Image (cartoon, helix red, strand yellow):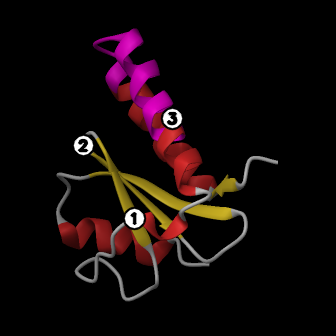
Amino acid sequence: MSGYEFHPEARTDLDEIWEFIRADNLGAADRVIAEILAAVRALVPFPHAGHRRPDLTGQPLRFKRVRDYLIAYTPDEKPLWVIAVLHGHRSPRTMAAILRGREN
């Protein structure tokens, strides 16, 4: 048991991130995804280590930054539930809409 699970669309987020970076550099794509997965694994024993983003959601989500990406997850669910992996330079309005669309 890994201690975490991904929302189906969060898995798609990872695939899209990998594909985007791979277009320029396969090794870099693999490293970024590995760093994101390592950050998620590190959150399992300390789920409240991430920060809140009340500007993006009123839900009790936490966020962890890895490079230019934000991992959005529910800290109180077991296993840890990863809602989204978003590029941090997207507009807050767009990120908020994506998160709203993935609640529950």
- Mark 3 lies on a secondary structure that is helix
Q: Which residue is mark 2?
A: 68
Q: Nearer the viewer, residue 70 or 76?
A: 76
| Between 34 and 8, the one nearer to me in the picture | 34
User: Where does residue 100 sit, x and y in percent of width and height?
Assistant: 43, 78
SS majority, magenta = helix
Contact between marks 3 and 1 (CB within 8 A): the answer is no
Q: Residue, x 72% and y 54% (percent of image)?
A: 3
Q: Residue at x 56, y 54 (%)?
A: 9
Nearest-to-viewer mark from 3 and 1: 1
| Res 78 → quadrant | bottom right
Q: Callout 3, which amino acid?
A: Asp
Q: Nearer the viewer, residue 32 or 103?
A: 32
As measured in the structure, the alpha-carbon distance from the residue carrying label 1 to the one carrying label 2 is 15 Å
Q: Residue 22 colored magenta? A: yes
For the C terminus, the quadrant is bottom right
Inter-mark Cα distance, 3 to 1: 23 Å
Bounds of the magenta segment: 21-37
In the image, residue 24 sits, relative to residue 83, either above or below, namely above
State the SS at label 2: loop
On residue 19, the disc is none
Q: Residue at x 34, y 73 (%)?
A: 97
Residue for badge 3: 15
Q: Which residue is mark 1?
A: 50
